[in-house]
Image: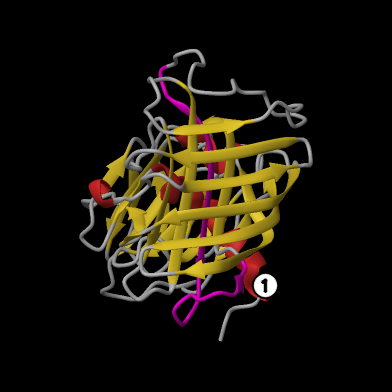
Amino acid sequence: MKRTAAGLNGNFIRSVACAAFLIASLSCDDGSTDSDLPAGPGATLSFNLDDSTSYAFSGTGVGVWPPSGTGVIARMDSSGTTLQVAAYLQTAGKTAGASEATHSAGPAHPAEPAGPAGPAGPAGPEPSFDLFYFEISDSVPLTTDSYPPDHGILGRNLPIADLALLGYQLVSGSMTLTSVTMERISGTFFGSGVRLSDSDTIRFGGGSFNVPYGRGLFSGDDTGSTGGDIGISVDTGLTPIYSWAGGSVYAVSVARAAAPTTLVWGVVTAGGDSIVSGLTHGQVPAGAMRIANSEPALTPGVTYRVTVSRVGGSYGYREFTP
């Protein structure tokens, strides 16, 4: 049976801590590579933002991830139960590619800096993007029907590393699939989002997409037992203490290493780095909210991954076995 929107809020809260990991390190899973990401002529996605700005993305070449230039790309898992769509326009940094994307003139959203309307923006140390990403899934293969988004994010003239805090997380909405074939998928969408840094909200409507898709989902591709630029240590026991270097963080999340995007426990704060080092698993510090709690105590012999994230995009992870 198709999922209803009743579970959307829980999925949104979980996605807040996952967003930096999912978006910043998206790559191809299931044995696929970036070279089989179809975009091609006719790959389009568009929507209206707050009735003032229109965004239109299109691809004329092969879509790539991590993003560079412009494109619209989609992925479907081998069972046909999960769809991921990403549309992006590089607004600053390296020279954009041969694809096309535009957004029409309209007032910048309050409290958000306006970005240049295309890839000719000023160069910088890290490319910035207009980026829209969403994921929908069901327990049975997707068909022509309406689905709430499992994850979704809208970034406006932002580096990938800043999407988790400064982008708008989708908190409500509906994605309606109007055509599903073996090679292409199309549909419409609408919804709303909130920015974690200041709780600013946006509405988007009139959305549509029509894009060929490849097999194999985007997924986090961090490998090895440690990674990132924040050092982490974990003591022993089923409710270990997590410690890290360099000061406070805004999110701490724990997942089984075999399923690193499915959290078993985690906490997050809005507005800044305020979770101090020395956090005990299962405890929620003042000012934070819990985003997952399926394992308030860990399971002996299972390998886990703890990830910490700071405003600005720095992060670190460590695997451990209690």
Residue 118 % position (x, y): 53, 23
| Nearer to me, 173 or 42 | 42
Q: Position of residue 16 (x, y in %)?
A: 56, 53
Q: Residue furthest bottom?
A: 1
What residue is shown at x 55% (from left), y 74% (from top)?
144
Judged left or right of residue 108, residue 241 is left
Q: Camera-side residue: 49 or 16? A: 49
Q: Nearer the viewer, residue 245 or 139?
A: 139
Residue 133 included in the magenta stretch of the image: yes
Between 173 and 301, the one nearer to me in the picture: 173
Left/right of residue 32 with respect to residue 112 in the rendered view: left
> To which quarter of the image does residue 259 belong?
bottom left
Give the image quarter of residue 98.
Answer: top left
Figure quadrant of residue 76: bottom left
Classify the position of the C terminus by image quarter: bottom left
Any part of residue 279 in sight: no
What colour scheme has been applied to the protein in the rendered image?
secondary structure
**Is 256 within the magenta?**
no
Q: Amino acid at mark 1?
A: Ala
Classify 207 as above or below 154.
below
In x, y percent, where is residue 219? 35, 56
Q: Residue at x 69, y 56 (%)?
A: 190
Q: Which residues are magenta?
A: 125-148
Q: What percent of the width, then of the height, locates residue 3?
A: 59, 78
25 left or right, relative to 281: left
Q: Where does label 1 land, which residue?
A: 5
Q: Residue at x 34, y 58 (%)?
A: 305
All told, the count of numbered labels is: 1
- Helix, strand or loop for disc 1: helix
The N terminus lies in which quarter of the figure?
bottom right
Decide if residue 121 is in sight here: yes
